[in-house]
Image (cartoon, rainbow, N blue to C red):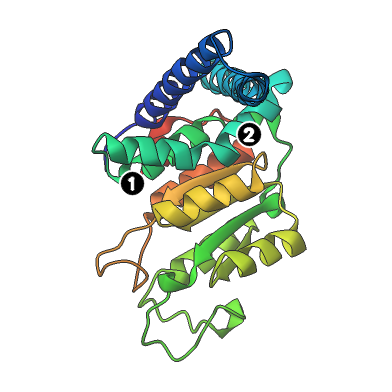
Amino acid sequence: MTESKGLFIGLLLLSLVVVGVLVSGIWYLNFYGFNLLSYGVLLIISLVLSVVSLILVLGIIGILLTIRLQRPIKSLVIPIKLVIAYFLPVVIHLGAFLGFDKEEIQSSFIKMSNQLINPEDIEVNAQDILILLPHCIQLADCNFRVTSDLDNCQRCGRCQVDDLIGLQKKYGLNLAIATGGTLARKIIKETRPKAIIAVACERDLSTGIQDVYPMPVMGVVNLRPNGPCVNTGVEMEKIEKAVEKLIFKEPIGEKIVES
């Protein structure tokens, strides 16, 4: 997919316009002809939506400034976190209404999230990095399952688990394969990384980024030549470039993480 992070940001701005119009309309109704109960209800709704609008404004400003300045804006971390954690479903529904594909929006969200990461602000060594992979990276017909123990891999080279273990040994990284979100969270809790390079489909990456933000998660969308969840792959050069950028503290460029 070639869509940029601008799709998500554009839909986020459109969401702000929709919320702003709604808030303005409800505040307008507050002053015209309602009884006390209706006025009280509308006032509460107006205040809640006004707070939501403010969070959305601050979150969007924080995202744009972070991407432009290539460093986090500490005072806006909480609004950014709230926008990332709660507004993605809103943006997806709005985008679907306008005819955009859900995966396009999720892919744009992932690219935007990747751009929020600045390695210069992360004190991370190779052993602090976790590469988190989906179980479908291993061939479905392999008899040596590696989800519970990577040492089970026979390093036959039929799938990319061999390449990824080689990358792990080359840099001294943490490498893990998860069968789902619950196991992924357990691995993160046990490993306690300072940065994650996650490989998955758009849906799982979006959910994972939301779950652990503000922990830096660099998302790389997997390759699905056989369809979803079966014998998937990943572009190894993107993984290695992401590792090197984190270790050597160079700013992340969109070309590194573009999926």
- Distance between the Cα atoms at labels 2 and 1? 21 Å
Q: Is residue 130 left or right of residue 67?
A: right
Residue 212 in percent (x, y) is at 65, 48
Which quadrant would the C terminus be assigned to in this image?
A: top left
In the image, residue 93 above or below residue 207: above
Q: Quadrant of residue 168?
A: bottom right
Q: Is residue 141 left or right of residue 74?
A: left
Residue 224 in percent (x, y) is at 30, 63
Secondary structure category for the residue under label 1:
helix
Q: State the residue at coordinates (62%, 23%).
A: 55
In the image, residue 68 above or below residue 247: above
Q: Residues within 10 Å of mark 1 (few under 14, many from 20)?
A: some
Taking depth in this image into account, of 87 and 73 the one nearest to the observer is 87
Q: Quadrant of residue 200?
A: bottom left
Q: State the residue at coordinates (52%, 81%).
A: 153
Q: Residue furthest bottom?
A: 143
Q: Amino acid at mark 1?
A: Lys
Q: Amino acid at mark 2?
A: Leu
